[in-house]
Image: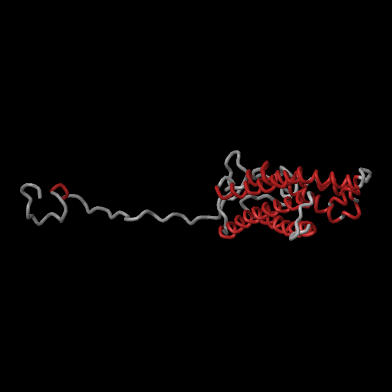
Amino acid sequence: MAHRIRGRPDLCRCERRRHRGDRPWRRRHDLARSGRVSGPPRRDIRRGHPPQRLAGAHPVSTQILWFATRGSGIVSLILFSAVACLGLLAVARAQSAAWPRFLTVEFHRSLALVSVVFLVLHIVTAVLDPFTSLGLSAAIVPLASSYRPVAVGLGVISVDLVLAVIATSLLRERIGQRAWRAVHWLAYGAWPLAIAHTITAGSDSFALWMLAVSAGCVLAVGCCVVWRLTAGETNRSRLQHVTGGTADPVALDSAWR
């Protein structure tokens, strides 16, 4: 206690002599005041950014859509890579005693149908995802998306080429072998566009596991292309030798496939 005021009854506890004439202290709040109730999520109005929702009313469903979009896209890439490999092997007439060529052709067609299912799922979930806000037009028209327009545009062009190949395959008997074969060459352009779309559009494209998936697809298709250019030309020369080099190119290509 201070000098000469020890034991004096006119001071409260924890006070000093200078506090004797003061009024009682006003009680302060121990906790901060409660904040105002949060309102609905507002739109992003920053300069240079497309209008997007900063927070969703249903974050769980949005996250499910994101996982569905990424998962179906990865599965579609793997399946289309397998379809491309089987198509190249079928053209190169790769076969063995345990695996005849017609199994490769049928497996190629069946796997193509399955890959289309996952491709449709990938497009639908991407359109429904409120984060990207693609819209139906952006899923059909290239470079019409406000979310990563170049990356999404590569995927849209790839999808358009695949749809053209599917449509001509269904109408193969009506449009003729020559027209079908000319359009079917678009598949060789759709696949690298799909690879570029995967690398540029995905948020985890440079993750180790995603790089392994992309590298595996590129390696598999690359090996089949080499096989097609080597063994395929050898088999084509054999067919021309059998026909004496006088066969019609369209008929020869039909027999080739």
Report the front residue among 164 and 236.
236
Residue 185 in the image: x percent, y percent? 80, 45
Q: In this view, does 222 lie to the left or right of 246?
A: left
Report the front residue among 125 and 104.
104
Residue 239 in the image: x percent, y percent? 87, 47
Residue 206 in the image: x percent, y percent? 57, 45
Residue 172 in the image: x percent, y percent? 87, 54
Q: Residue at x 60, y 55 (%)?
A: 66
Report the front residue among 241 and 15.
241
Picture quadrant of residue 31: bottom left
Q: Which residue is drawn at 37% across and 53% down?
A: 32
Report the front residue among 206 and 147.
206
Residue farthest to the top, as pictured:
48
Q: In this view, does 157 lie to the left or right of 178?
A: left
Q: On screen, 14 above or below 222?
A: below
Q: Which residue is drawn at 73% across and 58% down?
A: 111
Colouring: secondary structure
Q: On screen, 188 above or below 60?
A: above
Q: Is residue 207 left or right of residue 99?
A: left
Q: How many labels were placed on the picture?
A: 0
